[in-house]
Image (cartoon, rainbow, N blue to C red):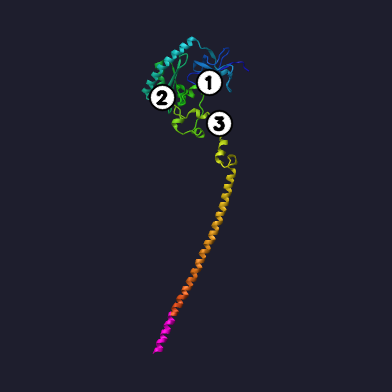
Amino acid sequence: MTGKRYAGVAFRCSRRIYCFEVGALHLKAGDDVVVETDRGVNMGVVVVPPEQAELPQGVAPEGVKKVLRKARDEDYVKQRENREREQEAMRICREKISHYRLQMKLVQAEYMHDGNRVIFYFTAENRVDFRELVKDLAHSLHVRVEMRQIGIRDAAGMLGGVGICGRELCCSAFLTSFEPVTVKMAKEQNLALNPMKISGICGRLMCCLGYEYENYRQSEGRRRPRRKNRGSPESGGGNSSGRDKNSSKRGSGEDRERKAAGADKAVKKDAAPDAENAGNRSGKSSGGQGGRRGRGNRGGKSRDKGKKDK
C-alpha cells in the first residue's frame, strides 16, 4: 500500500472521470477543485470521493497528477471570466472557419483555468486541414490554440438537451463512455424500426437501446422454444400434436395405398377395353372376310340360278 489518497474528478467538456491525488485534503462529492493536468491548470468537480476512489489498474502512482486546492472565490471569478472569453473566441473562430471555407462545425470552446490555452471542439465528416486556422486564431487571441475533432454523439453530450422521453440526455447526464448500439438491439426488443423513433437528437441510435438488451438476450433461450414448439407438451397441446403427426403418417400411408389400388384398377380397366377392342377388331375382320365371302357366295348362287333359268 502506498498510503496515497485519490479522488475521481470530471470536467465540463469531458464525460470521463480522471483520477487525481488529493493528499491530505478533505473532499466530498460535488466539491469544485483546481487540479494540475497535462494541458495546464484546470477546474473540475469531484464525482468520486477519496473514500471510494481507487487507483486504476495499470496506472503508476508516480504519473498521477495532484489536486492543488479546493475552489476559492477568486477561482469562481476567474471561471466566469473564462466563460465570457469563450463566447468571444467562438465568434472569432466561426468567422475564421467561414473565411477559410473549412467543412467543419464548431461545437464548443474551452479556456483552461489559467487562461493560457483555449481548446476548440468541432465535428466534421472528414479530416480537416486547420493549420492556417490555428495560426490565425493564435495571432488574434494571443493564447495557445488547440483544435480537437469529436464525434456527433460527443457533441450532443457536450451541448446537452432533452430527449424524446422528456428527460435530460443520458450522454450529458451520467454516461461516461459510449457503447456500440446496433439495429439488432431494437429488433430483439420488438421495437418499431422507424429511424424517427429509435434515433436521438444526435441522429444516431439512442443509447438507451442497450440498457435492457442483455436481459432480452438472456431470455432469448426461454422464449424461442415456445415460439417454435407451440404444440409441445409444455404448451398444453402435446397429445393433439402427436395425434396429428400419427394421423398425418397414417393418412399419408392410406393415400399411398389408395393411389396404388387406383393405379391397379386403372391398369385393369385399360387392359379390358384393349382386349374387347382386340376381339371386336378380330370379329370385324372376320366378319368382313365372311361378308366378302358371303357376297361372293351370293354372287355365285345368283349365277347358278341364272344358269338354271337358261
Instruction: Identify which residue, 60 or 172, lies in the foreground.
Output: 172
Look at the numbered disc 2 and give the secondary structure of its residue: strand
Q: What residue type is labelled 2?
A: Lys
**Gap in angstroms between the C-alphas marked 3 and 1:** 28 Å
Asked whether residue 303 appears in the rendered view, the answer is yes
According to the picture, the residue beneath numbered tag 1 turns out to be 17
Residue at 53 percent across and 59 percent down: it is 262
Q: What residue type is labelled 1?
A: Ile
Q: Which of marks 3 and 1 is nearer the N terminus?
A: 1
According to the picture, the residue beneath numbered tag 2 turns out to be 105
According to the picture, the residue beneath numbered tag 3 turns out to be 215
Q: Main secondary structure of the magenta part?
A: helix
Above-or-below relation of 244 to 157 = below
| Label 1, residues with CA under 10 Å away: few <14, some 14-19, many ≥20 | some
Residue at 52 percent across and 62 percent down: it is 267
Instruction: Identify which residue, 195 or 233, lies in the foreground.
Output: 233
* Range shown magenta: 295-310
In x, y percent, where is residue 9? 53, 18
Asked whether residue 149 appears in the rendered view, the answer is no
**Gap in angstroms between the C-alphas marked 2 and 1:** 26 Å
In x, y percent, where is residue 183? 49, 33
Residue at 51 percent across and 64 percent down: it is 269
Is 63 colored magenta in this rendering? no
Look at the numbered disc 1 and give the secondary structure of its residue: strand
In x, y percent, where is residue 84? 42, 14
